[in-house]
Image (spheres, grey):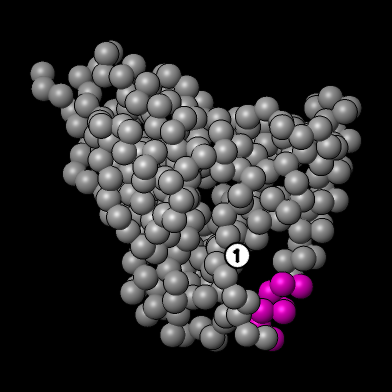
Amino acid sequence: MGLTTIPLTVAARNEARAIGPCLESLLRAARFAEQRQPLRFVLLVVLDRCTDGTAAVVARYSEVATAQVTGGKIEAQRRGLRPGPFNLFSDADIEVSEETLLELCQAMTRPEVQIAFPGKQPLPCRRATPLARALHAYNAARGYSSGRTWFSGKLFAIRAWDIPAPAACLARARSLPPSPFYAWTEGLRADDIYLSRRCLAEHGPAALVETGGLVRFRAPETWEGMYQYYRRLRRELERTDALFPETRAVHARFGTRHQDLLAAAPFGERRLHDLFRLALLACRARYRWERLRVETRARAAGDPWPAVAESKAL
């Protein structure tokens, strides 16, 4: 039996402090899978306007190809899309356990599965502040939620990756009021929001499968880092609602978190969750203020989608 070639794309923008450990863990997981199944992984790092040493770090790995793109994570994935039974996409600031890629490939042998993704856990805290511990506990417990009808975009296998190009978003944006805050014409920015909704609408929740293996990532540990994550997620949810209103019904049906595990958490974690909720209220207030400020004035200079700098080192 011949080898099955699996394309694996890593989207990277200014990831010099994280991409080395990321690639080493992916290559280790690829070798682990290839020794056990007739598989061959082809790694491609798509560099999105990198201005740091990311390209130099990637160049150390002879088994990893590179490509260049502009336009953000979605366009990096579009550039990396290649023929295969399915495609794997990875962020550049994660580490994976050795068995992760094998578990993903085994899940994708089931014809009903459209998207497979491993569980994820935050790396140990580097700060000892109460908020850092609260954010770590929240991420480690996955929001104290048993409901998981969407997938994590940090690493996933997908059978039919298809996100509308900026030109398609532009056609829809013409029917919306101009907005310097939402920037309708820039295209979508988050992969898992749109793809989760589309998969659920077309195939139902059984098509999304969480596998064995593990993704480790650096969770935010400051309120500023928490806010940047919140801002990116909240704005993309609202942009997706406006640009693709036909997906709202799917989100209303499947997108609610069920925080039914919190009551069973240890007392200390419940108190940390109270602190998390207070910080979240502050994030919501700042988001509304920023949206009002940007909409009533000219767009602020700089990148409207800033990366969370504190999470970019493994």
At horizontal 45% and vertical 64% (from top left) the residue drawn is 188
Secondary-structure class at tag 1 = helix
Q: Position of residue 184 (x, y in %)?
A: 49, 75
Q: Is residue 98 above or below residue 308?
A: above
Quarter of the image where the N terminus is located: top left
Determine the image quadrant of residue 28. top left
Q: In the rendered structure, does residue 294 fall within the stretch colored magenta?
A: yes
Q: Report how many numbered discs are placed on residues in the image.
A: 1
Q: Is residue 179 above or below residue 227?
A: below
Label 1 neighbourhood size at 10 Å, few (<14), some (14-19), many (20+)?
Answer: some
Q: Considering depth in this image, is 63 or 86 the residue closer to the camera?
A: 63
At horizontal 34% and vertical 16% (from top left) the residue drawn is 32
Q: Main secondary structure of the magenta part?
A: helix
In the image, 39: left or right of 50?
A: left
Determine the image quadrant of residue 50. bottom left
Q: Which residues are magenta?
A: 289-296
Q: In the rendered structure, does residue 173 fall within the stretch colored magenta?
A: no
Q: Position of residue 280 (x, y in %)?
A: 78, 53
Q: Pointer 1: what residue? A: 235
Residue 148 visible in the picture: no
